[in-house]
Image: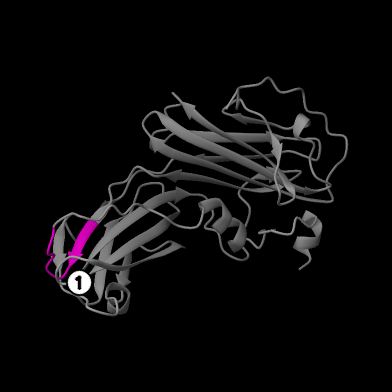
Amino acid sequence: MALVSLAACHKTEPADAGMVLAYIFHMSDNLDEIDVFIYSDPMADPSQCRAFLNDWEIPGEWFRNTYGGVYLGVLVTGLGLLPGYIAQLDVESNVGSSEGTLNMPDTLSFVSHADSDTVEVSDLAVSWKKAKGADFYDFWVGITGYSPSGAKIGERSIYFFTKDTSYTLPRDSIVFPGNYGYSEILFDIDPCAGVMPEPGATSNMTGELAGNFYLINTTSPTLFLYAGTPAKAGQSSMAKRSEDFRLRVERALNLYNPSGEPFGARLQD
């Protein structure tokens, strides 16, 4: 994505209703993704929007999306957003401003099992050590079922936000109909800082626009398990696949807007 110099922001039309959603995904020691969305009525002018991380202006072009808002999305290298990093985000626009501060959470470690353990085909209790600085977790588990000879017969995934540090995967989610033999199970859990997305969640950004700011550390180790005796070891190529984190936040906060109706109308639903 080309980097551009954004024009100064002048507040000319205060929003009757508005909200900022901001995300920083820590993807590796040298790569981070920053996404900032402004939903408002009237809609913000992309040419008059700016965002700053610790007083550094985040480069990139703002666009209108199809859901009644404007957004900035960039991949950035060299920021050093390691665990404990204090991130102060300031968002400015012609419809209002908002700011928030969070600390990047640490990674987690699993305590119930070792990677590549074999477990019984029964309810499976998994637990992990609380990640320092985490307010909640983005939980995902993928299950792939095989026949006794190792032929793939099905797959499914489960994902949700949680404040817990344990989860019991029901046996019914592990087994598959048909000529079932065993399963491969992958847990991938990301520590997150911010207010857990759920109906009635409070804002953690202040200013003329309300806002929710999230830091997501995606660098924790995963946990891979066999349920039952595998015919072939390590054949699965499972990776975390779930409905987009940002879309799930919007659904949880009742902001999902496929129709593109004005932001204020959505708040009245």
Q: Looking at the image, which is closer to me, 88 or 248?
A: 248
Which residue is situated farthest in the right direction here?
12
Q: Looking at the image, which is closer to me, 220 or 193?
A: 220
Please provide percent x and percent y for residue 39. 73, 48
Please provide percent x and percent y for residue 69. 73, 46
The part of the chain drawn in magenta is 224-232
User: Disc 1 marks which residue?
Assistant: 147
Q: Does the magenta stretch include residue 230?
A: yes
* Rendered residue at 21%/66% (across/down): 151
* Rendered residue at 60%/27% (across/down): 58
User: Visible in this render: residue 103?
Assistant: no
Please provide percent x and percent y for residue 239. 34, 52
Which residue is situated farthest in the top direction here?
5
Q: Quick check: 213 left or right of 148? A: right
Q: Could you say which quadrant of the image residue 165 lies in? A: bottom left
Position above or below: 132 against 137: above
Amino acid type for the residue under numbered disc 1: Ser
User: Visible in this render: residue 20?
Assistant: yes
Position above or below: 216 against 53: below
Q: Looking at the image, which is closer to me, 43 or 98?
A: 43
